Amino acid sequence: MKLLIAIIQDKDANRLSNQFIDHDFRATRLSTTGGFLKSGNTTFMLGVDDERVEEVLELIKTTSHTRQQFMAPPVNLDAQLDNTSSYPVEVQVGGATVFVLPVDQFHQF
């Protein structure tokens, strides 16, 4: 058995949650915040049998998409830099970060 921890962008969370339900996976859904853009993420935790791990990874891969987003860089108080650093920059967000961990014991009460 494995514990999967999947961190995805909020925009993909409902679609992935529905896929988990359709494929009979039980998942715990947590609202989380990303550190880079300080935007909302969703973290799913799933206990999965070893032979179904690839199936879950494929569901995550097909429902969690990367996208481009504009972000305003933090204000720089250094007057020596030019003013172009205050314009929004385009960054890639989304996709998924997944951790697969071994589970020594699993109990359901």
Image (tube, rainbow, N blue to C red):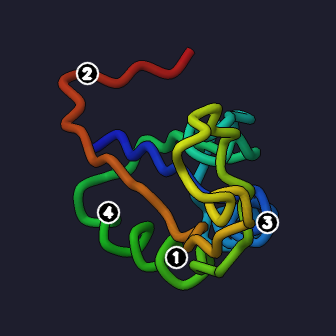
Mark in the foreground, 3 or 2: 3
The location of residue 12, given as percent across then percent down, is: 73, 68
Q: Secondary structure at mark 2?
A: loop
Helix, strand or loop at label 3? It is helix
Q: Are marks 1 and 2 in contact (CB under 8 Å)?
A: no
Residue 63 at least partly seen: yes
- Asked whether residue 1 is in view, the answer is no
Q: Position of residue 31 (x, y in %)?
A: 74, 35
* Residue holding disc 3: 11
Label 1: which residue? 59
Which amino acid is tagged 1? Leu
Say whether marks 4 and 3 touch (CB < 8 Å): no
Instruction: Give whichever of discs 1 and 4 has the lower sequence position.
Output: 4
Q: Quadrant of the C terminus?
A: top right
Q: Measuring 76% from the left and 56% from the top, which residue is drawn there?
A: 10
Labels 1 and 2: the sequence-earlier one:
1
Amino acid bearing label 3: Lys
Q: Which residue is mark 2?
A: 105
Q: Mark 4: give few (<14), some (14-19) or many (20+) Cα within 10 Å.
A: some
